[in-house]
Amino acid sequence: MIRPDIHPHDGILVAKNLVKVFGKRTVLDNVSLAIEEGKTTVIIGTSGCGKTVFMKHLIVLERPTEGQVFFRCNRIDDLRPRQLAGIRTQFGFCFQMGALFDSLTVFENIIFPIQQHRKITDYKALDELVKHKLALVGMDGYQNQYPASLSGGQKKRVSLARAIALDPTVIFYDEPTTGLDPVTSDVINELILKLKQELKVTSIVVTHDMKSAYKIADRIVMFYHGKIIADGNADHIRNHPNDLVQQFIEGRVSEADLAALKLGGTKYQTQFLPEDFK
């Protein structure tokens, strides 16, 4: 159902006053955010701050305790699974560790979402589709390989090819550079930029990698204890006056945590002493 107070210019995805409670813990605390179409929004924050839970609400893998989620002005958080199926074909998801099926070839991994949502009748066209998606991420020629034979970076690229198999309008990236060396991480950054430009997709990226965030983001949003505490472009975040923001982007331990680390405790003798080896 279209809400009269939600307009297309508000954003392709809009979260309104989201609250999510697990047991006695409030993970999202009255969060409102509009995702701009065709832009890359990067969500940052410490572990457990609510950023991944928020992203799951946008694709209705989680449902809010309170609040609403809208896609193209239509409310989706209250839809039944069968109603959501068609909407989710417009979402691509690149998982943190790739989440490829080890028993399937690269080709079979990429056609998996197609098989779930469409009836395949033209296998020659399917071959061309897979070739095209792999070529976009620089992996054409790997169709018959299994995930076990691929490097971490190659697995991420195949995961990206699978994420765009259904020609989504929105791509979600969950920690896309985690576990990768700096050079391979930058390859993934370049691919995120390339897909945005060539496919005209909207991108939502959850990451701890500030170098990546600064490179790919049109907008950076920071979560802290279930709330948004900073929102702006890279320059705005770099120069943000909030010390919590600066502490995170600099990777700096807080004074409270530092004090806790310096507290004395029981001291145990080491198992071996230098003289034991004389």
Image: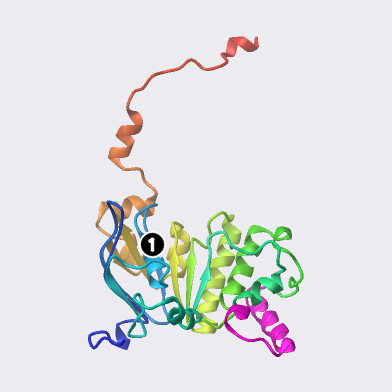
Residue 54: image x %, image y %? 36, 65
Residue 61: image x %, image y %? 43, 68
Amino acid beneath label 1: Val
User: 265 or 124: which is nearer to us?
Assistant: 124
Tell me the colour scheme of the image.
rainbow
Q: Which residues are magenta?
A: 114-138
Would you identify the image quadrant in which residue 107 lies? bottom right
Does the magenta-highlighted stretch encompass residue 103?
no
Task: Say which quadrant the N terminus sits in.
Answer: bottom left
Residue 235: image x %, image y %? 34, 66
Q: Secondary structure at mark 1?
A: helix
Residue 185 falls left or right of residue 237: right
> Does residue 265 appear in this view?
yes
246 w.r.t. 112: above or below: above
Would you identify the image quadrant in which residue 2 lies? bottom left
Would you identify the image quadrant in which residue 140 lies? bottom right
Which residue is located at x 35 percent, y 43 percent? 253
Residue 244 falls left or right of residue 272: left
Which residue is located at x 70 percent, y 70 percent? 106
Which residue is located at x 67 percent, y 78 percent? 135
Task: Say which quadrant the C terminus sits in.
Answer: top right
Residue 86 falls left or right of residue 188: left
Q: Which residue is label 1 attached to? A: 53
